[in-house]
Image (spheres, rainbow, N blue to C red):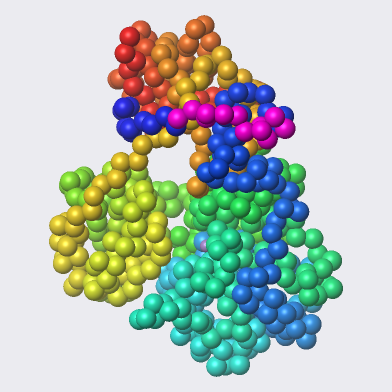
């Protein structure tokens, strides 16, 4: 048992899988990992996904309404009709909107096609009556990453004589009999529809748009000439940003998308990542930590338009202007977030014995509620809801995040009487309530009991420092991408000394592991508090992730996840 988590070592393999002989993998701990993830009977993924080429992507044409939506959109484009794209303001929505617009414009250079988005502060998520008016003179509307729950606005738009094509990946709206309410759309394309093949349920909103484009290529000669692979950087970014599982086709999309990033980065993306790309290839982490938070910032602060415009612009100076605007918005997002954290943390601390945290502070900016909830979850290892005063007088808005496998949506359902609106999924929810319901809600959640979950760290095996080198870690990284539902493997390194340790800016620690004469660098993110626990003479057992660090020349770096004193 470490400082932070319970540890659990996965039992060793009882035999070697025959297919393991066909791999070119050399390192024995990587081979074991490969067998577990790709070859064993309870493997997360079939082995074709360990490499996976675009030819392995399964045809999506049995997704209900996909073909119908594609041919409807094509006939509008062939007739020169005006087409509106309405997309969500987060990274998934932006990427999907851009993908569709660029695909359409490449196939039909004269198309009249415009992207619309909500303002998060004023209008909130999804379509509303305000948008119905804006798209009055459009013949066709395609929603991206939204629409499944906008039943009324879509009815109104379709009553105006506009053909609506919904593309979405959120849960469908249900009536009182728990039956799906179908929006008044010509095509309702959503892999979460109960009649859709479950295989595609992992798609992001942009992934659904990608599949729509596949279908358009099938039914239009003009579309058939447009290559889709160059758009996979957008699909890849959406997958990582929306934290959809890195399973099935998503693995192929991310792999190709990262190649696309590394061979031909869009100028606006390149600017946003410039300081990191100097240090090695763009990978999942570069996107998560460097690109995506900046892309999300303008939408959080109100309007995502600098990101949309920056991605669509061709002129270097224009791109530069939107880049600077994006960075500026991200800086104010970070300031607001730090300020809000100092308001939220003491409130959560006072609730630390509750099973579910639920804090309200009137001044918190709506755009950072979700980030704060995630951070509370992480720090207190329990579900958390963060609420603030909305721009609408008398209304409170909130965002909740789950910890572990228990659903935060199920928690919200227990208190549904207090909410004017709530929705989302197992891991994340959004909600709003009238201020008169605040106190009863806080009191209710304070008494709410939910057995707490301890999630042990699943450790692959105990390895030796001397087995860690450029080749073995490159092999391990070649089995990625790693992330949601396909985590980076954890390894145990036993009985090591830590002869060197120093504090870095931002509460990080950096040091050296030593075992039987071998030395490897390690880093411990946000772990300044461990400095007291570690000294140069004791021996330790450490749970680590293994990475290549490209800072100067590629070297192996362990990322410390947990630590205990070794019994010697
Ligand atoms: Mn999405």
* Residue 305 visible: no
Rendered view: 300 above or below 421: above
- Part of the protein shown in magenta: 11-22
Which residue is pictured at 67% across the width and 65% down the height? 60
Which residue is pictured at 46% across the width and 85% down the height? 152
Which residue is pictured at 55% across the width and 93% down the height? 159
Q: Quadrant of the N terminus?
A: top left
Where residue 92 sits, quadrant-wise, is: bottom right
Pick the front one: 405 or 401: 405
| Residue 445 rendering spot, x and y as whole percentages | 20, 59
Pick the front one: 551 or 409: 409
| Residue 336 rendering spot, x and y as whole percentages | 38, 52
Which residue is pictured at 33% across the width and 67% down the height? 431
Pick the front one: 458 or 337: 458
Pick the front one: 214 or 297: 214
* Residue 78 visible: yes
| Residue 252 rendering spot, x and y as whole percentages | 67, 50
| Residue 89 rendering spot, x and y as whole percentages | 52, 65
Q: Is residue 13 magenta?
A: yes
Rendered view: 73 above or below 466: below
Q: Is residue 380 magenta?
A: no
Name the side, left or right, on which 190 lies relative to 107.
Answer: left
Rendered view: 67 above or below 289: below
How many marks are shown on the rendered structure?
0
Rendered view: 197 above or below 495: below
């Amino acid at each position: 048992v470490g400082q932070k988590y319970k540890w659990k070592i996965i039992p060793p393999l009882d035999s070697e899988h025959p297919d393991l002989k066909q791999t070119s993998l050399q390192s024995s701990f990587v081979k074991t990992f490969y067998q577990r993830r790709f070859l064993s009977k309870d493997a997360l993924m079939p082995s074709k996904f360990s490499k996976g080429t675009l030819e392995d992507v399964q045809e999506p044409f049995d997704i209900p309404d996909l073909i119908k939506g594609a041919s409807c959109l094509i006939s509008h484009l062939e007739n020169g009709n005006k087409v509106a794209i309405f997309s969500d303001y987060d990274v998934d929505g932006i990427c999907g909107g851009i993908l569709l617009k660029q695909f359409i414009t490449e196939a039909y250079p004269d198309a009249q096609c415009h992207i619309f988005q909500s303002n998060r502060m004023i209008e909130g998520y999804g379509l509303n009556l305000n948008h119905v008016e804006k798209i009055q003179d459009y013949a066709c509307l395609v929603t991206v990453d939204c629409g499944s729950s906008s039943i009324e606005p879509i009815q109104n738009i379709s009553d105006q004589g506009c053909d609506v094509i919904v593309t979405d990946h959120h849960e469908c709206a249900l009536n009182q009999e728990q039956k799906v309410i179908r929006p008044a759309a010509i095509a309702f394309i959503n892999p979460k529809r109960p009649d859709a093949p479950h295989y595609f349920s992992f798609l992001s909103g942009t992934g659904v748009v990608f599949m729509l484009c596949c279908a358009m290529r099938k039914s239009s000669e003009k579309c058939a000439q447009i290559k889709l692979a160059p758009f996979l950087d957008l699909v890849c970014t959406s997958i990582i940003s929306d934290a959809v599982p890195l399973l099935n086709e998503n693995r192929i999309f991310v792999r190709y998308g990262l190649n696309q990033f590394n061979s031909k980065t869009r100028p606006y993306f390149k600017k946003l990542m410039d300081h990191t790309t100097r240090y090695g290839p763009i990978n999942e982490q570069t996107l998560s930590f460097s690109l995506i938070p900046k892309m999300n910032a303008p939408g959080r602060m109100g309007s995502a338009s600098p990101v949309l415009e920056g991605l669509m612009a061709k002129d270097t100076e224009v791109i530069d202007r939107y880049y600077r605007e994006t960075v500026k918005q991200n800086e104010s997002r970070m300031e607001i977030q730090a300020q809000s954290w100092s308001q939220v943390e003491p409130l959560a601390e006072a609730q630390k014995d509750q099973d579910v945290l639920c804090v309200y502070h009137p001044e918190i900016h709506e755009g950072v509620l979700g980030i704060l909830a995630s951070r509370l979850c992480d720090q207190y290892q329990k579900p958390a809801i963060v609420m603030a005063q909305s721009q609408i007088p008398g209304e409170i808005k909130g965002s909740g995040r789950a910890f572990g496998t228990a659903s935060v949506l199920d928690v919200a359902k227990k208190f549904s009487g207090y909410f004017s609106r709530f929705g989302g999924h197992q891991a994340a929810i959004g909600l709003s309530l009238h201020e008169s319901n605040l106190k009863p809600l806080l009191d209710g959640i304070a008494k709410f009991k939910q057995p707490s979950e301890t999630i042990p760290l699943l450790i692959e095996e105990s390895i030796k420092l001397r087995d860690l080198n450029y080749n073995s870690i490159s092999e391990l990284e070649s089995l990625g991408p790693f992330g949601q539902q396909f985590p980076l493997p954890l390894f145990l390194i036993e009985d090591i000394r830590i002869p060197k340790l120093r504090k870095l800016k931002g509460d990080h620690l950096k040091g050296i592991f030593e075992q039987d004469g071998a030395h490897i660098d390690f880093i411990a993110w946000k772990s300044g508090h461990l400095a007291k626990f570690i000294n140069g003479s004791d021996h330790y057992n450490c749970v680590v992730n293994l990475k290549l660090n490209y800072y100067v020349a590629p070297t192996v770096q362990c990322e410390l996840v947990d630590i205990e004193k070794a019994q010697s």
